[in-house]
Image (cartoon, coloured by chain):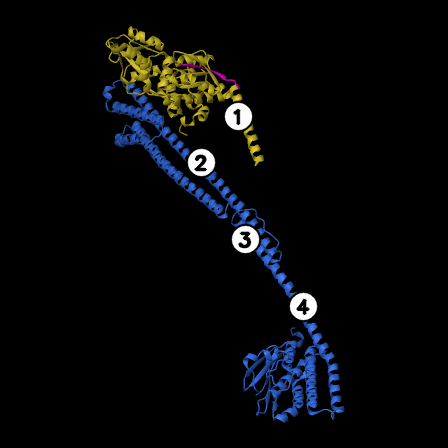
Chain colours: A yellow, B blue
Amino acid sequence: MLTVITAVRNRLVFLILLWSCQQQHVEDKELQILSVGLTPYVGEVATFIALEEGFFEEEGLAVHIVINTSGVESMKQLLDGKVDVAHSSEAPLMHALVDSTFHPHAIRKDLRVISNMILSNRLQKIIIRKENPIINPTTENRSLVGLVRNSQSEYHFDSFLLEHQLEPDRFELVNLTPAEIKPALQNGVIQATAIWEPYATDILRSLGKEVVEAETKLVYNSLWLAVVPQELLLEKPALAIGYLKALRKAQEFILKNPSRAIDILEKNTQMPRDLLEMVRDELDYYLSLGEKTLIVLDWQQEWMNKRGIGVGNRLDPKIILDYKPLSIAFPQGISVLE
Amino acid sequence: MKIRWRLNIISLLALTAFLILFIYIHSITRIIEEELAELEKINQFEEDISQLIVSTEYYLSNKNPRYLESMQKLYDKIIIDIKNIPDFLQFKLAVQALKGGENAFYLVLRIDSEPENYPNIKLREELRERAKINIRTELRQLMSLSYTISKNKLQYIRDLQSRQRENYLMVMFPSILLITFSTFINGRHILLALDKLRTGALQMANGNLSHRIKLGQKDELGELAEKFNDMAVQLQLRTEKEKELVRNLEKNSKKIEMSNKELEQFAYVASHDLQEPLRMITGFLSRLEDKYSEKLDGKAKQYIHFAMDGAKRMRTLILDLLEFSRVGKHEEKLQEIELMDLLFGLKQVFESQLQETGGDIILPKSLPAIKGYPYPLRQIFQNLISNAIKYHREGLPPQVEIHFEESGKFWQFSVKDNGIGIEDEYREKIFEIFHRLRQNNMLKGTGIGLAIVKKNVAHLGGEITLVSTPGKGSTFYFTVPKNPENRSN
């Protein structure tokens, strides 16, 4: 009996020592640095939460964020090699992949989408000045529309024109940052804008009776993609997996702690809390790679080609998606017809 | 712990394991059935989306409104299907896709049904194309989503089944192991104890009553071993007592044997040595009578006569006593005896007495030759016949009948007379030495004849009995063994 007790005791001591050593090893493990280019808007709540709550550190990552005005900027930084990950919509990505005019380092065909991070079809909005309804123009002058060029807002505005059977030639697109749009619209420098949340609601709320949201039936499926160079996936696949795992944890955190999520978003976007609460239901946070992603990417190319952009550089959207990191981090998010 | 408790615990363990397993299988089967039912709904969802895609594509290609009504029904049905999606985000995704698709489809319908509102053909076609893209995007998203949900559900069911198998093994394997181990341990425990009990029983059966069974357990078998040991102690005590009794019996038998021998020796010596002084007494009394006959008066002669008579009777007694003591001492070889010759010879011996009394000895017509010792047999018949003649009824000639028959391993003889008979109270006493039936001097004899008969019959290994009716006669039955070599002492 004594022998048995001694043997059990020895094993327990050994296991405790082993566990202590492993804990020490984890604590001592050097964090892998990852720089991410992102845009401070509602679609980035998960990233901010992962930073604030230490989910990236839990996955062995030291994430440094680069705050940009839009996904276009983040994509250009990725092409410059200034960031490892770019958060952007499908439009800047496709420009980076097939449009040589987009940036000196475009066309870069080794960019890979490791996940879409949001679900929304009400993220983009068209806002027009009341005294100059662009749908029924009273003047022959071209209307000025302020938006972020090469972003999904541009495509959304194009769809809007189509829906209302308006000739694009009647409009001049002015490249503005989201921060520049509100004063430009307020001052009448531009007559309309296509902008995403929470800027859209902010403009509507701030300018009140001066502006109105244009009606549109054609829903726009917004993608907000995590884009990385293929090199990263080949050399450090664990980084991409860890990155997505941390984001997934943050997404679950949002569902469980919506109020705390708003706190973090408020802190990182400098937007009023009530505004953020108003737009909270416009989108959901869900890591996914699905048929929608493929079709949107494909159609984005088609649309660009029709406008004479990236002709001859057409890519199979299946090549652009890399399912491996998500298949490990969150396999439920993959919904592609095989 | 008592064996019955151990067996009860094992039974309880087995029953509990069975119950747990039954409840677990029942519950998990129910869960799987529920999941399968959900999977069926998801499959229905997939099928509905497929139908919607096919119908939509048909319309988009041909602008044929043939399936519009069924499409509306499908949209309504899919909305119900979507409500069964358990994951909230997937549910929202599906709702978004369905609504987006529906909106885009209605836009297409509006373009097709109200082309006048879209006068720019190029822009109209482009809008229709974009709406088509939207429809396809949303419906394919729905399709892939239903496929993913179905795949995940199927995987979940498989995981559940796998977990069921694992849990089944996790429950069953330790239970079976525990029950088997307990059964083995208890079985071994019982078998070892039984083996010790068996060995102990064999030892005791072989006479080793000092052997004790040591089980060192307090269960039923331990109690059995204790009782067994108690029984062995009792048996040992009883056996030792019996041995003591046998030893005492043997000691007493030897004493009796020695005493008998000494008595016989004494009788022989006494009877033999007493004859000489008796002869002197008789001799000198004869001389006194012869030489001083004239000087003695009648009274003195009468006294001498009494003394002479007493001396003669004493001599007879001594001779009889000598004869009694010699029973069994004759060194005679076993031989074939012609019974007819033997009895016929005896009849001649008693011839004068028979003539004197008018009696008769009736012999069987034929008698076999038997193996035996002639002297004691002759003495038995002679004494019985002599008594039969001697104790005849007055005025009635003695009739002695001798019979013979086989009786198992013995020859049985009978000597029947028509004499005075013997009272029941004397039936045993007549075989005692010096006992006479009638204590009067009218009858001759010393009273030792039947004692000699009994001693001879016993010595030959037989038995003697008597059947008698006072005033009518007696029949003596005696047996001798057919094989005297095997006679018991």
Please tell me whether the stretch drawn in magenta is mainly helix, strand or loop. strand
Q: Nearer the viewer, residue B413 or B39?
A: B413
Q: Which mark is residue B255?
A: 4
Q: CA distance from mark 3 to mark 4?
A: 41 Å
Task: Identify the amino acid type marked 1.
Answer: Trp
Q: Dot 1 lies on which element?
A: helix
Residue B108, how many percent across, how many down?
Answer: 28, 24
Q: Amino acid at mark 3?
A: Lys
Q: How many marks?
A: 4
Region rendered in magenta? A28-38
Tag 2 and tag 1, C-beta contact below 8 Å: no
Subunit of label 2: B
Q: State which chain disc 1 sits on.
A: A
- Counting from the top left corner in percent of width and height, residue B78 is at 30, 31
Instruction: Name the quadrant containing residue A44.
Output: top left
Task: Mark yes or no: residue A101 visible.
Answer: no
Mark before the other along the chain sequence, 3 or 2? 2
Residue that appears at 69% across and 92% down: B298
Q: Which residue is mark 3?
A: B227
Q: Which residue is mark 2?
A: B163
Determine the secondary structure under disc 3. Answer: helix
Same subunit: marks 3 and 2: yes
The amino acid type, in three-letter code, at marker 2 is: Arg
As for residue B459 lying within the magenta part, the answer is: no
